[in-house]
Amino acid sequence: MTRYNGSEIKTTGLIGKFRDPSVGHVLEKLSANLSQRGLRVLFDQETAAHVQNPVPEALPLEKLAAEIDLAIVVGGDGTILHVARTLAEHDVPLVGVNLGRLGFLADIPPDELFEHIDDLLGGKYRIEPRAMLSAELIRDGEVIGSGTALNDVVIYKGDISRLIDIETWIDDQFVNHSRGDGVIVATPTGSTAYALSAGGPILHPELPAMALVPVCPHTLSNRPIVVRDQSAIRIVLARSSQQAQTTLDGQICFPPMQLNDAVVVRRSKHDMKLIRPYEHTQYDVLRAKLNWAQ
């Protein structure tokens, strides 16, 4: 964790919640404030459609990420998941503004936005590198699907109401053969998402680890396990009469799995750089989101 040097910011990118007109007013005020500070402001092209007045410049997300020093994401955790993959590839840090309830990632309320912008540009923020996952679907030795995820890679039974049989291997070492609704491979960031609702452990964001969490296992002794984040995890579909799907962050879907197909999950070479106020800790967020001590 390191201090973020806000004085190095020259160009900012504004990204709003997908297809949500309510973000327009906040983005207009934010754009005006940043422009008054002498910063170049670029809008995500899809976001610009929700702003009534003309925007300074608008670019597709991929081109936007190549131009900016900082992304300000207005929406919530889902919006951050949507853009994290692209921003991480370009090593662009982001800060999240939450328009709803406090999020695990987007934790700045809009009524405190400009106060936080002052702190951000003044270097009163820190960078939290968040590990991401790289996943490949392999069939007969060929990669037929690939992508990255910030939260999790999920192999699940799809639309059928039957259990699936899977084999789990870690670093080419056999772990188990299991039956259930599926399995979640989660980052520390993703440990408070789907994996948490499936009974998985909460991992601190700085922990170099991944969690494997079974979803509704037929054998109750099949419990979540935590492995080092340098491991290669291979999940193999073990029965041909079944169907299985793979999703990344609930947003990317691989082709349906067939018998002996394998999903291989590793830590990605890219991290997402999340910028947070110094006074906000992971434990503050957990207390607020999980209603601890209430």
Image: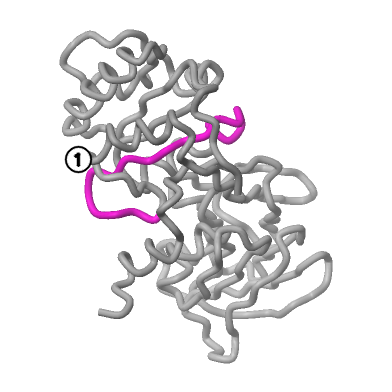
Magenta segment range? Answer: 86-104
Can you see residue 86?
no
Q: Can residue 4 be found in the magenta stretch?
A: no
Q: Inspect the image, locate mark 1, and give the three-letter code of the amino acid beneath it.
A: Asp
Residue 272 vs 40, above or below: the answer is: below
Q: Nearer the viewer, residue 262 or 22?
A: 22
Residue 128 located left or right of residue 287: right
Taking depth in this image into account, of 62 and 9 the one nearest to the observer is 9
Q: How far from the left and from the top, in percent, is residue 282?
A: 45, 61
Where's residue 117, x and y in %? 35, 32
Disc 1 element: helix
Q: Residue 126, image x and y in percent? A: 52, 44
* Residue 25 visible in the current orientation: yes
Q: Residue at x 30, y 13 (%)?
A: 36
Residue 248 higher or lower than 123, as above or below: below
Residue count near mark 1 (Cα–Cα under 10 Å), binned few <14, some 14–19, many ≥20: few
Question: Which residue appears at 59% of the width and 85% of the height?
Answer: 222
